[in-house]
Amino acid sequence: MNNNNNKICIIGLGYVGLPLAYTFSKKYEVVGFDINKVRINELKNGFDRTKELTKTELEEAVVNNMLFSLDIKDIKDCNIYIVTVPTPIDKNNKPNLTPLLKSSNTIGQVLKKDDIVIYESTVYPGVTEGICVPELEKSSGLKFNVDFFCGYSPERINPGDKEHTITKILKVTAGSTPEIANKVDNLYASIITAGTHKCSSIKVAEASKVIENTQRDVNIALINELALIFNNMDINTNEVLEAAATKWNFIKLSPGLVGGHCIGVDPYYLTYKAEELGYKPNLILSARQINNGMAKYIAERTIKLMIQKSILVKGSKVLILGITFKENCPDIRNTKVIDIITEMEEYGCNVDISDYWADKNEVKYEYNLDLVENYNLNDYQAIIIAVGHEKYKKLNISNINKVIFDVKTVIQNADARL
C-alpha cells in the first residue's frame, strides 16, 4: 500500500493499540485515539503506564508525526480505522460488546467513501459483519461493501513480553471482499517482519483468534487438574512435568491462576455463540470451571496448612505477593489473585497485598484495594506468592512458624506449591 495515501487511526491505546500505533507511525501518518483523557495526557507527556513503550519510543512516535487525541475532529481525515478496544465479559460470563459498538459509532460519524475499518478485538465468529457493520452503517449512512469496507486482523500481543513483540508475531488478516483482503494483508505486511496469513473470510479470522486462547485455557486446565490429583498423592507436580517433558511432543505448561484479558475471557465468547446455536461445549466450560476454581483451592489449602501449624486463622495476618495477572507485567485486568484475597478474607484473615509491578492507583480504582510497599515478612502468619515476578525469586524467607504457599514455584523452602 502507498504510505502517502494512508492516514491510520488506532482506536484504543491500551496494551494492543499503543504498540500497534507506534509501529505504524514509522511508515504512516497515525492518530492514536482514546476516550481516556488521563491516558492521552500521560502519553503526550511520554509516560506509558502499561510499560509497553519507553519515553524515548513515545517521543519518537511524536517525531514521526503521530498524534495522541480524544477529539473526534482529529480522526475525520483518516482513511483506515483500526479498532483495538477490549472485549470483556459481564458478571454472567456473557460477551460485553459495548466498547466495540461505541467505537463503531464513533468511526461511523467520520466514515467516508472507500474508508476501511479493521477490527483487532477478540470476538466470536460473526461479530464484525453481524454487529459492528450495522452500527457503522447506522451512524454513517453509508452502505457496507459499497461505500466502505471492513477487515479483521486479530491482535496477538503478549503483555510484558519483550521478545515476541508485534513485528515478530505472524499476523492473521482478512477482508470483506477479495480486494480489501489484499489491501488489509498488504497493510500489515508493510510492518510485520514475521509475515502474514490471509484468511478466506472475516469469520475464519475471528474463529482462529478465539480458539488460540481457548486451546491454551483447556491445556492449562488439564495441568491444573493434574496438580490437584498429584497433590493428593503427595507427588511434586513440577517434577512430574519435568519428566514428562523429556518426550518431544509433550506440551509443557505450568499449573497456576488463569486470568487476564484473553485466556480467562475469550473462551466465553466461543461458548456463548455455541450455546446460542444449540451446542453445549462441555470440554471448554469444564476447563473454565477448573481454572476458575484454582484461587479457592489455594486459599483453602493455605488455611488447612495454617491449622496444621496451630496458627489461629481468624484475625491472622496474610501477605499476598503479586496482584497482576501474570509475571513481570503491570496488567491487572481480570486477575484471579482477587479471588484468593476474597477467600482469605472470608476466613477472617487480614490480608495485605504487595506488587512492585502494579500501579497502586489503578489497583485502588479497579478493586478498591490498597497496596503495601514496605513489609516485614516476619509480621505475617501466612505468605502467598501468587505471581512469579522476578524479584520474588530472591526472597529470603526463614523457616519459622508461618505458612508459605508458592503458587508459581519461585522459591525453594515453601510449605506448599501447585
Image (cartoon, rainbow, N blue to C red):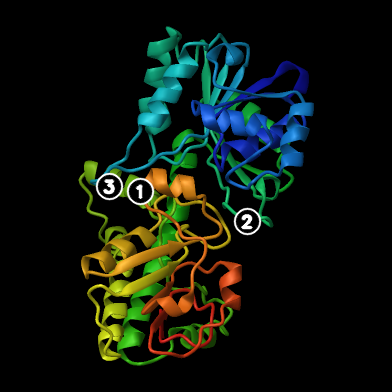
Q: Residues within 10 Å of mark 3 (few under 14, many from 20)?
A: some
Relative side of 83 to 283, left or right: right
Between circles 1 and 2, the one closer to the viewer is 1
Image position, residue 166 (x, y; %): 66, 46
Give the mark nearest the N terminus, 1 or 2.
2
Residue 185 visible (yes or no): no
Q: Element at badge 3?
A: loop
Q: Residue at x 32, y 80 (%)?
A: 228
Q: Are marks 3 and 2 in contact (CB under 8 Å)?
A: no
Q: Which mark is residue 93?
A: 3
Question: How much space separates mark 1 and mark 3, taking CA atoms?
Answer: 22 Å
The CA span between labels 1 and 2 is 28 Å
> Label 3 is placed on what type of residue?
Asn
**Residue, disc 2:** 161
Q: CA distance from mark 3 to mark 2?
A: 27 Å
Query: Which kind of residue does numbered mark 2 sit on?
Result: Asp
**Residue depth check, mark 1 versus mark 3: number of the one nearer the observer:** 1
Residue 69, quarter of picture: top right
Q: Report the front residue among 16 and 79.
A: 16
The numbered mark at residue 90 is none
